[in-house]
Image (tube, grey):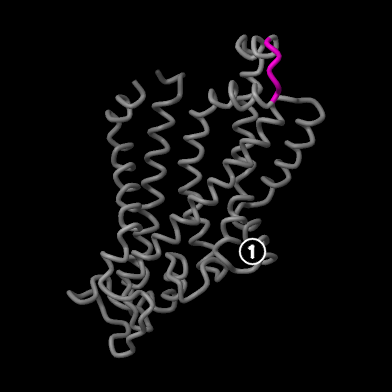
Amino acid sequence: MAWKRLLENRMGLIGLAVILANILVAVLAPWIATHDPLKVDIINRGSPPSKEFFFGTDDYGRDIFSRVLYGSRISLYISFLSVLLATVFGVTIGAIAGYYGGLTDNIIMRFMDAIMSFPAILLAIGIMAVLGGHLYNVVIALGFVYIPRFARIIRGSVLSLKEKEFVEASLAMGHSDLVIIFNHILPNCTAPLIVQATVSLAYAILAEAALSFLGLGAPPPAPSWGNILSDARNFMLDAPWMTVFPGISITLAVLGFNLFGDALRDVLDPRLK
């Protein structure tokens, strides 16, 4: 029924199509790219879009089309890994806090509240300043920032589910707390978790682009959408194509995940059935 309702949601299907297109482009980038994204061509520097250079070239003569394609790899790679990291730790922390409650819940959730009190991008910048610029450090920074979002959602679900009859039956059968949490409670929390993960992917793409724009993301000359925009910011008036195409790529990727996340929320929310 959920799949049928999703197929009837046009905006959700558009979002899914955009997501799949981004993933396909990222996977096939070495075959789709028309030039080496790192090759410097001083003769063709600042060339406008043409048959040879579909998106034009930057101030070093590098093909923007190829750099945008390879940039999708870095952006999706970081966003997926950071959300996966946040999901694993957030689910574990939220489940423990919700199941045991009391002092354990208060300590854990006050720490989560402390993390959420900082603006996400500023906290990520602070973590990157300590760890240094590297792809894996970006994953750690963004993953840490988004852990409280997952922890709060899972905690709320666990608080309502731990009083259900099937949990009491598991306790009566002598099952351990870990078995009850991971085998009986968490499988019933998948709907809000899937929605939150999908929406968080959009935020992670934006955050990665912002960090790269500030020089804290993928180290140059590796192309990412953020550092492509950063390199082009001084040429916005003279060569607008340098910023337009990576900007459109970021917009489409974020829009796709947001549309699909909204559709999943509508489909999986039992109150809307």
Crowd around label 1: few <14 · some 14–19 · many ≥20 (10 Å)? many
Instruction: Give the quarter of the image for residue 109.
Output: top right
Give the number of marks: 1
Residue that appears at 64% across and 25% down: 181
SS for tag 1? Answer: helix
Residue that appears at 40% across and 60% down: 73
Position of residue 171 in the picture relative to residue 73 (left or right) = right
Residue that appears at 31% across and 66% down: 30
Q: Is residue 118 magenta?
A: no
Per the image, the residue denoted by label 1 is 128
Position of residue 223 in the picture relative to residue 93 (left or right) = left
Q: What secondary structure is the magenta-colored segment mainly?
A: loop
Residue that appears at 31% across and 53% down: 24
Task: Provide residue 32's location: percent of width, then percent of height.
Answer: 26, 64
Q: Which residues are magenta?
A: 173-177
Front residue (pair 205, 189) = 189
> Compared with residue 82, is residue 155 higher up or lower down, i.e. above or below?
above
